[in-house]
Image: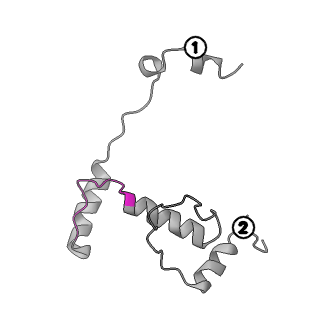
Amino acid sequence: MPLYHFVTADLPSNTKAPELDDTNAAAALKADATWSGVDVSAGAGVTEELVGLYASYLMQIGFLPAPTIAGARPLPTARITEEQKQAVMNVGGRGGAA
C-alpha cells in the first residue's frame, strides 16, 4: 500500500515540487543562435513530421515493427547507414557483446 495516497489524495494541491525554470537553457540556446544561425530559445513544438521521423528511425533499427494500417500516410525516411544500424545494435542490452 505504499502508493495508496497517490490515488486517494488530491495530488495537484498536495504535491510539493520545485518550480522549474528554463532561464539557463533559453540563454544557452540564444547564444547558440550565433553559431547555428537558428534561434530556438523561445521553444519549439513537436510536429507530426518529427514524430514520424523518430518512428521511422526506430523501425529502421528494428526497435519497432512497420505499421500495418492500410492507407496510412508514408513516414519520412530517416537516413541511417548500415554501419550506424550495426553500431546501435552493439549498445548494451540490444544484442551487444557486453
Instruction: Give coordinates of residue 10: x percent, y percent.
Output: 48, 15
Res 20 quadrant in image: top left
**Amino acid, disc 2:** Arg
Question: Furthest residue to the front?
Answer: 71
The figure's colour scheme reads one colour
Say left or right for 24 vs 17: left
Q: Residue at x 52, y 63 (%)?
A: 55
**Amino acid, disc 1:** Thr
Q: How many marks?
A: 2
Question: Furthest residue to the right?
Answer: 97
Res 58 quadrant in image: bottom right
Q: Residue at x 62, y 78 (%)?
A: 85
> Dot 1 corresponds to which residue?
8
Mark found first going from the N terminus, 2 or 1: 1
Q: Quadrant of the C terminus?
A: bottom right
Q: Secondary structure at mark 2?
A: loop
The answer to if 44 sits in the magenta stretch is: yes
Binning the other alpha carbons within 10 Å of mark 1 as few (below 14), some (14 to 19) or many (20 upward) gives few
Q: Quadrant of the N terminus?
A: top right
Res 96 quadrant in image: bottom right
Q: Nearer the viewer, residue 68 or 48?
A: 68
Q: Secondary structure at mark 1?
A: helix
Find the distance from the CA under tag 2 to the CA under tag 1: 39 Å
> How would you classify the magenta stretch by its main secondary structure?
loop
Q: Which mark is residue 94?
A: 2
Numbered range of the magenta stretch:
38-48
The answer to if 73 sits in the magenta stretch is: no
Say left or right for 98 vs 42: right
Q: Residue at x 21, y 73 (%)?
A: 37
Q: Residue at x 43, y 21 (%)?
A: 12
Instruction: Give coordinates of residue 60: x percent, y percent.
Output: 58, 73
Binning the other alpha carbons within 10 Å of mark 2 as few (below 14), some (14 to 19) or many (20 upward) gives few
